[in-house]
Image (cartoon, grey):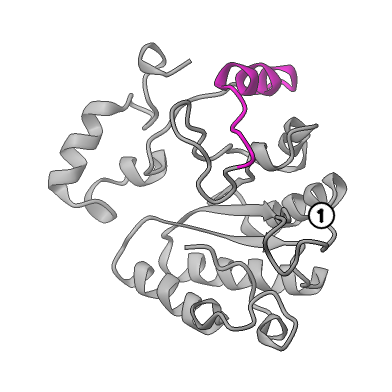
Amino acid sequence: LMLESTSERLLEHGGAHRGCPDKVPAVRLATLEAAGRLRVPFTTGILIGIGETPEERVDALYAIRTLQDRYGHIQEVIVQNFRRKPDIRMRDWPEPTLLEMLRTIAVARLILGTTTAVQAPPNLMPDGYEVYLLAGLDDWGGISPVTRDFINPERAWPHLREVKERTAQLGFQLRERLAVYPDYILRGDEFLDPAVLARVRVLVDPGGLVPPEKELW
């Protein structure tokens, strides 16, 4: 569940979240907290470029960090850039630049530390997305060779081989993981039901990742 923002201003007239009661920050934070109490490995994130200020981005990241410190269940935080579409009210809204993305990813890494992965979708910034790695990104998210991005269907996923090559060009190795991050697999039944954990362990190597010989690329 994306937090998107902690800004209440976005609920006001003309705001990106106007008329969206399910996007009230307190409601989404309550859901994240409930997942923490239930020990559910969770992915959340922020959406940038929808009218929030840089300070509000920081506030949202600190809100996530607070929940992570309390429950330890936030496995990944997505930094997603707004992309306008012709059939929405914000169709003329300016989109975040590559520099804005790099700044936000870097700040996210500083705030979240090393216990939470920072992810950004490569298909939403096709020209130069690999430099995200230099700002602190360490995950590309769910890139599917068989399905489209259902949130942004007009933005095709890059080919897995391309992502692997661009990642390698900057000195990093692309590895496949499951939906549950390695950390949470290695911690045993603290975050996974024993029945699920037994199935999961069959699919991963000792480090909690998919073995290289079973990777899709």
Residue for point 24% across, 51% down: 192
Is 160 magenta? The answer is: yes
Residue for point 75% across, 82% down: 14
Q: Residue furthest front?
A: 87
Residue 65: give x, y in percent of width and height. Answer: 57, 66
Residue 152: give x, y in percent of width and height. Answer: 59, 47
Question: What's under tag 1, amino acid-wise?
Answer: Pro
Residue for point 74% across, 40% down: 125
Residue for point 80% across, 47% down: 102
In the image, residue 206 sits, relative to residue 110, either above or below, namely: above
Residue 61: give x, y in percent of width and height. Answer: 65, 66
Q: Residue furthest top?
A: 213
Question: 104 or 4: nearer the eye?
Answer: 4
Residue 31: give x, y in percent of width and height. Answer: 41, 74
Magenta segment range? 154-172
In this rendering, would 19 be left or right of 207? right
In the image, residue 49 sits, relative to residue 155, either above or below, namely: below
In the image, residue 36 sits, relative to residue 22, either above or below, namely: above
For mark 1, give the secondary structure: loop
Q: Residue furthest bottom?
A: 12
In this rendering, would 180 be left or right of 195? right
- Tell me the crowding category of disc 1: few under 14, some 14 to 19, or many 20 or more residues within 10 angstroms, Cα based: some
Q: Residue furthest left?
A: 195
**Which residue, given by chain and number where applicable, does mark 1 sit on?**
96
Question: 21 or 67: nearer the eye?
Answer: 21
Q: How many marks?
A: 1
Is 38 magenta? The answer is: no
